[in-house]
Image (tube, rainbow, N blue to C red):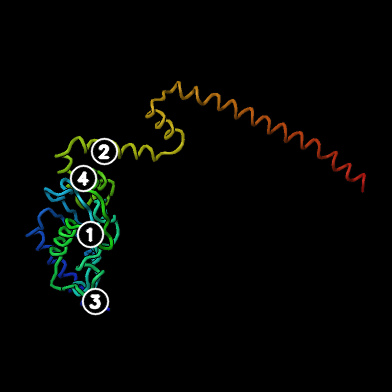
Amino acid sequence: MSTSSERRQNLQRLQRELKALMNDPVPGVHATPLPANMLEWHYVIQGPEGSAYQGGYYHGIIKFPQEYPFKPPSIRMLTPSGRFEPNQRICLSMSDFHPETWNCMWSVSSILQGVVSFMLDNAPAIGTINTSEHVKRQLARTSMQTNCQCKQFTELFGDLVEQWRGENPESATQQQQQQQQAGGGGGSGVGGASGELEGAGVGDSDLRGAILPLAIVLFVALGVLVWIFMGDVMIKPGAHTGAGGEL
């Protein structure tokens, strides 16, 4: 187990790496630690030009152990890419799958470069999947819309989201409409049902016309249940008397 002094030194190492990464960023990669947790970093890889991932934005997480840099981190990619299984640990020589090959001289920058390189490769490994280039391109087109459904992503990479919206106004408008529909669909009761019916092209008069027959059926069914119950209550006293006579 590491001591508090060692953990403090390890955190200082990550702070230095953050500063170095800000001064010399990995091309096409954005990375930042959580404000309240220096051991958890979030990154976004912009799909390299000329690849099946071009135009895509791929959000992932690197979790460093308290013993970093003497032990390797775990690496995941959250955004569906067609290369990595979403939110599953990726087996890399610089990940926690292979502590025996870890080099403590590696940094956040070299880890990010390794993820990009492995993403462009086709070698199978734990945490990877095999899909066609067509699927990868489809996922690239919808990647930012998928990312924007994650509150943490929009909070950490708000500038990137705004840049994407400015460059892709039609896709951004579609994404915002989907969010609004999802918010409306989350409602319950008559309001939510009415919204769904209006979305399907059903007007107020049609809605009343559909509800009225249903109300009549329910009223008649309730009357039948009451009649059966009252009849049962009137019969039971006689049955008890008869039983008493037999006794």
Report the mark closest to the observer, 1 or 2.
Answer: 2
In the image, what residue type sits under mark 1? Leu
Q: Is residue 231 above or below residue 86?
A: above
Q: Picture quarter containing residue 234?
A: top right
Quarter of the image with the N terminus in it: bottom left
Q: Amino acid at mark 2?
A: Gln
- First along the sequence among labels 1 and 3: 3
The residue that mark 2 highlights is 176
244 displayed left or right of 18: right
Could you tell me which residue is drawn at 54 percent across and 24 percent down?
212
Mark 4 to mark 2: distance in Å? 22 Å
Q: Tell which of 176 and 48 is nearer to you.
A: 48
Under mark 3, the amino acid is: Ser
Q: Label 3: which residue?
A: 4
Give the Cα separation between the discs numbered 3 and 4: 47 Å
- Relative to residue 222, is residue 160 drawn left or right? left
Q: Dot 4: within a 10 Å radius of its alpha carbon, few (fewer than 14), some, or many (20 or more) residues?
A: many
Gap between marks 4 and 1, in whole Å?
Answer: 30 Å
**Upstream in sequence: badge 1 or badge 2:** 1
Residue denoted by label 1: 34
From the image, tell me which residue sits under label 4: 137
Residue 45 position within the rendered picture, expressed as x and y whole percent measured from the top left: 17, 53
* Label 1: which secondary element: strand
User: How dense is the environment of label 2, judged by Cα within 10 Å: few (below 14), some, or many (20 and up)?
Assistant: some
